[in-house]
């Protein structure tokens, strides 16, 4: 297979293992263009019969510190982690941008082949949603996981309303959603957010080993079993993101959302008024 080239990610393959690396360091904020590139790469690998497992990794300090719909969707200085950056665009244009983003996000869940996330640092807000689109996650002690939407006066998105409770259980998901707290490596391992915890210098090798352990098996059986285990997931994510978007749009119009974005950017507790 000819390896396609992308603007913000790299795609390589070694044997039966492929690697997608996000290249927007240091924090790898995403917009719909980045998610589209990852989805395009996954679809290309679905068509490659030699690829049997995929590692999703990222350059820089963070795995993905959230969404940024600023001027160019990249690392805007001072941008809040895990929230859309406020701009002068209208509510309708922001809603449309999020709709496009969620359409691309659903494509991630339609990938046919197992994906292992190599989580070297924070996975915050929508970045947590990206991490949970993977089948497995290998993390280092520097990894941090947070569904910090409530601190922004916002509703979770990226299908997290489904993926987080499915992974860690309803009670742990409630705890993360309603506190917005950051979960560190050891707690993440105990909770089930990550499947393996290794020192940072061993992270990529550990993710590769897990991918290779999967890839050494019968490829048709791999596809069949994974399809069974994830049956209906992408369709459920598509339906849930419609609901998440509706709630996000409603809450985006509140004073609390504006205060939450300021508070997170200024690294202080929000002074919320319930309006």
Image: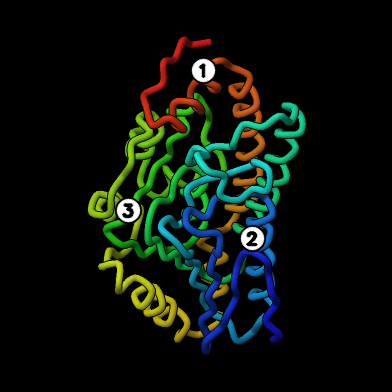
The crowding category of the residue bearing disc 1, from other C-alpha atoms within 10 Å (few below 14, some 14 to 19, many at least 20), is: many
Q: How far apart are the alpha carbons under marks 3 and 1? A: 32 Å
Which of the two residues, 197 or 7, is positioned nearer the viewer here?
7
- Given the current orientation, which residue lies at the most extreme front position? 77
Which residue corresponds to mark 1?
Answer: 256
Q: Secondary structure at mark 3?
A: loop
Residues at circles 3 and 2 in contact by the CB criterion of under 8 Å: no
* Residue under pointer 2: 110
Secondary structure of residue under mark 2: loop
Q: Secondary structure at mark 1?
A: helix
At a point 55% along the width and 59% down the height, the residue shown is 24
Image quadrant containing the N terminus: bottom right
Q: Residue at x 60, y 67 (%)?
A: 9
- Side of 88 where 213 appears, left or right: left
Left or right, 69 with reference to 123: right
Residue 63 locus on image (x, y percent):
45, 57
Q: Mark 3, residues whose alpha carbon is within 10 Å: few (<14), some, or many (≥20)? A: some
Residue 192's label in the rendered image is: 3
């Amino acid at each position: 297979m000819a390896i396609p080239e992308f603007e913000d990610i790299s795609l390589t393959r070694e044997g039966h293992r492929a690697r997608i690396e996000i290249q927007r360091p240091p924090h790898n904020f995403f917009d719909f263009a980045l998610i589209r590139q990852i989805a395009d790469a996954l679809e290309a690998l679905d068509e490659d019969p030699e690829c049997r497992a995929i590692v999703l990794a990222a350059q820089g300090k963070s795995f993905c510190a959230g969404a940024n719909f600023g001027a160019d969707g990249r690392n805007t200085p001072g941008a809040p982690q895990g929230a859309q950056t406020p701009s002068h665009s209208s509510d309708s244009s922001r809603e449309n941008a999020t709709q496009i983003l969620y359409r691309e996000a659903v494509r991630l869940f339609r990938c046919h082949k197992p994906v292992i996330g190599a989580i070297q640092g924070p996975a915050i807000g929508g970045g947590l949603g990206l991490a949970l689109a993977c089948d497995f996650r290998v993390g280092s002690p520097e990894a941090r996981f947070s569904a910090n939407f409530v601190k922004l006066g916002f509703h979770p998105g990226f299908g997290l309303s489904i993926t987080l409770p499915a992974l860690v259980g309803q009670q742990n998901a409630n705890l993360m959603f309603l506190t917005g707290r950051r979960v560190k490596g050891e707690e993440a391992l105990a909770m089930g957010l990550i499947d393996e915890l290794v020192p940072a210098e061993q992270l990529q090798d550990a993710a590769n080993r897990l991918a290779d352990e999967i890839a050494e098996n019968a490829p048709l059986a791999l596809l069949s079993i994974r399809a069974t285990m994830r049956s209906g997931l992408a369709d459920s994510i598509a339906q849930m993101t419609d609901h998440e978007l509706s709630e996000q749009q409603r809450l985006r119009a509140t004073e609390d959302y504006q205060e939450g974005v300021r508070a997170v950017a200024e690294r202080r507790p929000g002074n919320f008024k319930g309006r």
